[in-house]
Amino acid sequence: MEKVKVGVCGYGAVGQRLADGAARQGDMELVGIVDVAPTLAVRALHESGMAYDLYLVDMSRKPEFDALGIPIAGSFDDLLEQVDVALDATPAGIGAKNKVMYEKHSVKAIFQAGEKNDIVDVFFHGYANYEKGIGQSFLKLTSCNTTGLIRAVDALDREVGVEKVVITIIRRVADPGDTHRGLVDVLMVDPVPNHQAEDLMLIMPHVHATGLLVHTPVTHGHIISLVATPKKSISKIAFLDICRAHPRIRVFRIADGFNSNTSLWKYARDRGNKRGDMYEIGVWEECVGMSGKDILFAINIPQEPVTTPESLDGVRAAMEMQTDRLEAVGQTNKYLGLVPGR
Amino acid sequence: MEKVKVGVCGYGAVGQRLADGAARQGDMELVGIVDVAPTLAVRALHESGMAYDLYLVDMSRKPEFDALGIPIAGSFDDLLEQVDVALDATPAGIGAKNKVMYEKHSVKAIFQAGEKNDIVDVFFHGYANYEKGIGQSFLKLTSCNTTGLIRAVDALDREVGVEKVVITIIRRVADPGDTHRGLVDVLMVDPVPNHQAEDLMLIMPHVHATGLLVHTPVTHGHIISLVATPKKSISKIAFLDICRAHPRIRVFRIADGFNSNTSLWKYARDRGNKRGDMYEIGVWEECVGMSGKDILFAINIPQEPVTTPESLDGVRAAMEMQTDRLEAVGQTNKYLGLVPGR
Amino acid sequence: MEKVKVGVCGYGAVGQRLADGAARQGDMELVGIVDVAPTLAVRALHESGMAYDLYLVDMSRKPEFDALGIPIAGSFDDLLEQVDVALDATPAGIGAKNKVMYEKHSVKAIFQAGEKNDIVDVFFHGYANYEKGIGQSFLKLTSCNTTGLIRAVDALDREVGVEKVVITIIRRVADPGDTHRGLVDVLMVDPVPNHQAEDLMLIMPHVHATGLLVHTPVTHGHIISLVATPKKSISKIAFLDICRAHPRIRVFRIADGFNSNTSLWKYARDRGNKRGDMYEIGVWEECVGMSGKDILFAINIPQEPVTTPESLDGVRAAMEMQTDRLEAVGQTNKYLGLVPGR
Amino acid sequence: MEKVKVGVCGYGAVGQRLADGAARQGDMELVGIVDVAPTLAVRALHESGMAYDLYLVDMSRKPEFDALGIPIAGSFDDLLEQVDVALDATPAGIGAKNKVMYEKHSVKAIFQAGEKNDIVDVFFHGYANYEKGIGQSFLKLTSCNTTGLIRAVDALDREVGVEKVVITIIRRVADPGDTHRGLVDVLMVDPVPNHQAEDLMLIMPHVHATGLLVHTPVTHGHIISLVATPKKSISKIAFLDICRAHPRIRVFRIADGFNSNTSLWKYARDRGNKRGDMYEIGVWEECVGMSGKDILFAINIPQEPVTTPESLDGVRAAMEMQTDRLEAVGQTNKYLGLVPGR
């Protein structure tokens, strides 16, 4: 089978990870990436050996790259001529503009959560509604929090059914290194319900969701506290078994030293994972509790890499590489090295 | 009626506030405070005019105070000779030692939450179980989080009954100015259930409670997210009415600018409240939501002053100043200027 | 002598403090304050008893205040009709617009550091160049860091002469409660020289200054490290004596517990100072060192209140209340309770 | 030539990096590492394929490792039997105890800065006093801040001579992921002079040094502001040329986006460097300034990896692998990929 040809548009925090993820998929070919300026991410790519071909949105800026010795493979049009599908990781709102380009070149596209829902055919999550994305031209991913949240709720829902869920998002306010946003010594609240609860209901309309979001001054991962009302009773142990069986959920123990969002990130860092990235959401064994029939648990969302697997699932759906949900996510998982039971 | 004579033992973050609170009670007389060293709090007391008489635990350290010109009114024994009741705000574990002194002088005592439950007659909360404290010799207050939490749950419980509650505590990790503890760029989790849920069940055994606690790197107030299952259905509006009617709960609106824990603290600071203290817990109008019959809401816990009113209620109970719960808390509220409906 | 009539324009973090400071000056009368909206600061003023008359920039917004029961004394024009001088604490750039109003009403004005130098007659510091402000119509204050910095450098300069100074500013990135700016887990650098060094040279042209500025994720005060080259040798002890003799500089000891910017702020808070404000810059006794003839020391800048005294000095200069520098600052100090040797 | 056999004792934040560094040296063989418990670092090593043989301090704990499937190559004695030199990265004070073991096995050792000076033969820095370490049995490295500081001062000193230096250390208070230490919203000061200035004078006794240290709530690198008095005048451009010519110093530009300690770390992370590590100290081009003849500049200290190169230099000196300073550091640099002019 011929490989699906992929381009990554926007090489920032998300785009870098989508490029790395796509490059690891044995049945995809990463043709190249496109960006607008010699950003630090582009310089880092160059200094580490230019693993991916770089295309340029505005060729009039090519002299800036020439001066730095950074090779340019061609224009945005040149890239789109060669690809089947674009992973669009441009800043919110730019994707809508790029859509015109994608249509011109008959290229499908997977947008990130910053884009508006009305520019796409389907609001997509690899595990929860893969079927809806099959053969569609324009898909939009859920946000980092919603992606991880749905992974967990969908896993529980497929086993015992979920009637409703109340979430409390303890949100990291900036990515590591950000200087354009931040908070100091503040817990900031957003109105109830948060958009993640509403987005969950768009993807999983049979589950009622609401929730609170509190911004906190940290950078290495969100933590979500969930109170789920299952349709059938489920024990803590059974719940943890569901989590362990999921290739994109990983169970950790505080007793082992995994006592924080940062401990998970540091562990991935010490494993040698590029950028200290972990694709899996984390669940703490000791942070599961029962309230009557309701189950309380906490998940860790590594905000930078978490949407990568589902974005690649989106490529599979749009390009009809697999028409079976589990087969599709299974291929993504295989190439990313995601295995259950760790 | 003769005023009840009160001593405050330990003049740290809590003790300073108990002293100020007791001094404002028209039917109590603050005889003095006792501490061990010329701490910054003691120096601040001195520089601002020595509003309270200072007694000394270890008279051999008196020369240190003499050198600074700080007058000493007498020894710990001298203080206990004069008082009916001690508000003990010493570090965790010291209260247990002080109890011997209190017994020797036939002085009743109100301990803070750091002490073990087995050294006291009753684990006390002014609103939730005032009656249990009446005439007792040794009372222990709930912690800052639990005090605020019970205020809210008790208020709801008395109106519509509460079957169970699941809480997520977003905990400030240090007080302003602390250099002996802290976290940087970390969300740290504790095992479920947290002690606050367990403590709530000790005070309100008819309510099931569990919860998660996440430590966050901030100093100006905890935020607790609660999912309460009421026995009778209740609307958002009715819930907010209950909160507004409570003299120790205050409702704020994000739309007005109260968007964070810090905004409440800053508001109290700008009002001219001493130390920027606010005795009330805060509830955000926009942070109430329904999940089926369950109600979701968030409260702000000003960790430094929040236990002061209930501590003073404890004096009233122990000394039998009032035997009616509402009459007792009403007196405390009156003297602290706490009025409903703000 | 008739009191000088003062209005405060803009009732934010700075304006609130200027109003409190002006109200304490026995030879000034605070006629009122003016603002644009029912901000939290205005609500706090109202809730604590409306100590100052409030005027409104845009009278069409009066109904918003009426709905909250906040009395309005009149329009901006009404205020300017009654005052001799305005303390302008509006956001950067607004002061330039207000200048038209001040000129129309023949009112003098003292602007804060956010305004451009070219709208004023003199760039002013009460201690360093009081004489230049005498009788002028429009003065501009130095910024918080520069105000404190010049206090220290001027004090040293008047005793032994200062040839040059190199400063390293460890800057708090936001005020307590700010949600519109902040940094998480970042030390951000600005190019050398920082504007504070350049501003110092505008006020003290005989001293060469340069420096580095590093933004840090804290809120309770900047710390500046200074390396000063004196013209005559000076010992550590003599330097500390100069500091102790200055009513707006206060010497603290780490050994006493003053180990941080926050400890100074907390001390002021525990003293009962409104908002925990301290007008004095702090110098740590243990943080003075010699490098050959050069002297190294560190100062703490309480960013919110620090410019208040020098702003009031500005009123004295503009209104020719005193023509002698020391007499002028002495009056400001007396009314603010600033005494040397603490 | 036979490779020098190296063991790493203690596999924490420093030990992991020393192991990686030693493994990259073509003329050294990393025999193994030794630790006491199945820490997260050990688990990460295991999960990523057990790149290094693991030895155990206390063989009675072997069952804990067996249960996790982590292979143990032998005891601490077994490791020391096989090696020529130990890189000791155990917690402060443990190295002194290990020294008995090293002596028993006639193994030389390189200790980190936490150990006392009196247990070693020489206090060592690869660039500044390599000759003193040649053939010695026990060397102690400078701390992270001092290591980076001396790199810069030594580089300047060898070109133009340095008479004295005043430093202001803006210190990160914890490593990423630490939960046992931290600060929130505090700048904490230490007495002048800091130990780094004193340590510099031990290594470079011909330079006078003093300085201030301020702890700040960040994790991704210290920043040091230096005011150096050169013996011969030097321009900014010449200074930057010296930095660019040094393989362990790298010059960055704010204008390119390198505006913070975190930007350097993030750049290394995006390059794919393991753990986001960068061995080089950073100098910002725009943060160099002149004060008379004195030069002001700022350096970034990546606290976790920065001592690795100098530790490996220590192995070279102790084992007399090279007797020429530049040849020795040149070998370390070659194997770590450190080249000037970047």
Image: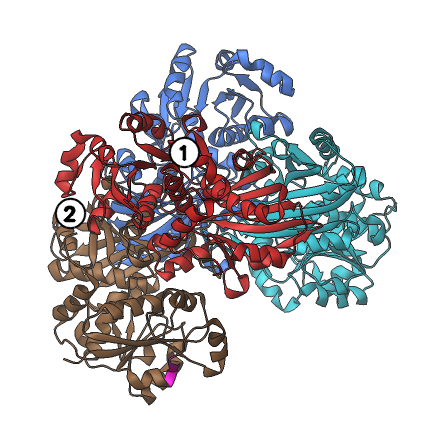
Chain colours: A blue, B brown, C red, D cyan
Residue at horizontal 56%, vertical 20%?
A54
Dot 1 falls on which chain? C
Q: Amino acid at mark 1?
A: Leu
Q: Which mark is residue B236?
A: 2
Packing grade of label 1 (10 A; few <14, some 14-19, many >=20) is: many
Q: CA distance from mark 1 to mark 2?
A: 53 Å
Residue at horizontal 56%, vertical 54%?
C242
Label 1–label 2 contact, CB within 8 A: no
Q: Residue furthest bottom?
A: B104
Residue B272 among those drawn in magenta: no
The secondary element bearing badge 1 is classed as strand
Residue on which the image places disc 1:
C139
Q: Nearer the viewer, residue B22 or B148?
A: B22
Q: Nearer the viewer, residue B102 or A142?
A: B102
Q: Amino acid at mark 2?
A: Lys
Residue D342 image position (x, y, % from top left): 69, 30
Residue C2 image position (x, y, % from top left): 27, 44
Q: Nearer the viewer, residue A230 or D245?
A: D245
The secondary element bearing badge 2 is classed as helix
Q: Is residue C206 above or below residue D146?
A: above
Q: What's drawn in magenta, residue-wise?
A: B73-77
Residue C62 image position (x, y, % from top left): 16, 34
Quarter location, residue A315: top left
Q: Is residue B214 visible?
A: yes
